[in-house]
Image (tube, rainbow, N blue to C red):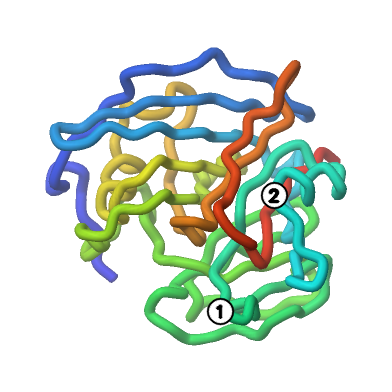
Amino acid sequence: MPLVSIADTLANWQGVFFSQPASLPAGAYFQKIQARSSDAQVQLYAVFFNEKKCYLRILDNPPSAAVDLASALRRAGDFAGVNGSYFHENFEPLGLVISNRQLLHSLEKAQLLSGILEIREHSIRLVRTNEFRFSKQIVNALQAGPFLLENGKMIRGLNKLRVARRTVVASDGKGNWALISMSPLTLAQAGELLASPDIFPKWRPLHALNLDGGSSSSFWANTKPTPVSIREFGTVRNFLGIHSF
């Protein structure tokens, strides 16, 4: 899929408010950001962490014992996280899911499921679905999509019509990662925003993959004295949780 430079995007985004970073374990931190373009204003909740100090894992949430994001993360001992990827109406996962080396659902080929979050013991990467290869070193993996950024550039052809809450996993290509929850906007707007240079004070995303959004979109960070929480509207099949080594 072709890339588009920031000069060719529909709108240039600017950060207009940045909360003070709130410390989390292992050097991770939470920050609330407000951003504005010529036709929209959105709010972002983000947790930033380094893959050498923290690990990211897939937490399965089967319907027989389903809980909300905050409860799942507290139970697992994770200090922050977001909702995971898509699922069918019967709550069967959609696409590849590996949790703690256990294959919970097989890889699928679909235009939407263009990327895989691949997690090894001390490294994380985002890969195209057609480039993914199974390995015994993979501890967790989650198939999702579409890609929003690759090599710092927005993906061309993202949907410009459907507005919804968004959840994104993103990397700067240097081992620094973010889990981000965005208030409602289109996929094209999300790509524009992430490609804009004025959004994140200390970090620039190079690659970004869209996770499930809409009613599934959720965020939780165990900040002190009060956790930051955006609750999902319904049952979600899996979550991404961050834990310190």
Query: Residue 227 falls in which quadrant of the image?
Result: top right
Question: Which marked residue is nearer to the observer: mark 1 or mark 2?
Answer: 1
| Residue at figure coordinates x 40%, y 40% from the top left | 183
Q: Where does the image place residue 145, in percent across and percent down from the top left?
A: 45, 66
| Residue at figure coordinates x 67%, y 45% from the top left | 81
Q: Is residue 42 above or below residue 108?
A: above
Q: Is residue 16 left or right of residue 176?
A: left
Q: Is residue 42 left or right of residue 38?
A: right
Q: Earlier in the sequence, mark 1 or mark 2?
A: 2
> What amino acid does circle 2 point to?
Leu
Q: Where does the image place residue 138, in percent across and percent down from the top left?
A: 75, 68
Query: Residue 187 falls in which quadrant of the image?
Result: bottom left
> What amino acid does circle 1 point to?
Glu
Query: Residue 160 falls in which quadrant of the image?
Result: bottom left
Mark pair 1, 2: CA separation: 19 Å
Q: Is residue 156 above or below residue 21?
A: below
Q: Name the residue nearer the viewer: 196 or 72.
A: 72
> Which residue is denoted by mark 2 in the rendering?
69
> Which residue is denoted by mark 1 in the rendering?
89
Label 1: few (<14), some or many (≥20) within 10 Å? few
Mark 1: secondary structure: loop
| Residue at figure coordinates x 49%, y 50% from the top left | 167
Label 2: few (<14), some or many (≥20) within 10 Å? many
Q: Is residue 101 left or right of residue 151?
A: right
Q: Where does the image place residue 22, in percent across and percent down from the top left?
A: 64, 19
Q: Quadrant of the N terminus?
A: bottom left
Q: Where does the image place residue 224, in percent across and percent down from the top left?
A: 74, 18
Mark 2: secondary structure: helix
Q: Quadrant of the C terminus?
A: top right
The disc placed on residue 142 is none
Q: Is residue 58 above or below residue 189?
A: below
Residue projecting furthest to the top: 20
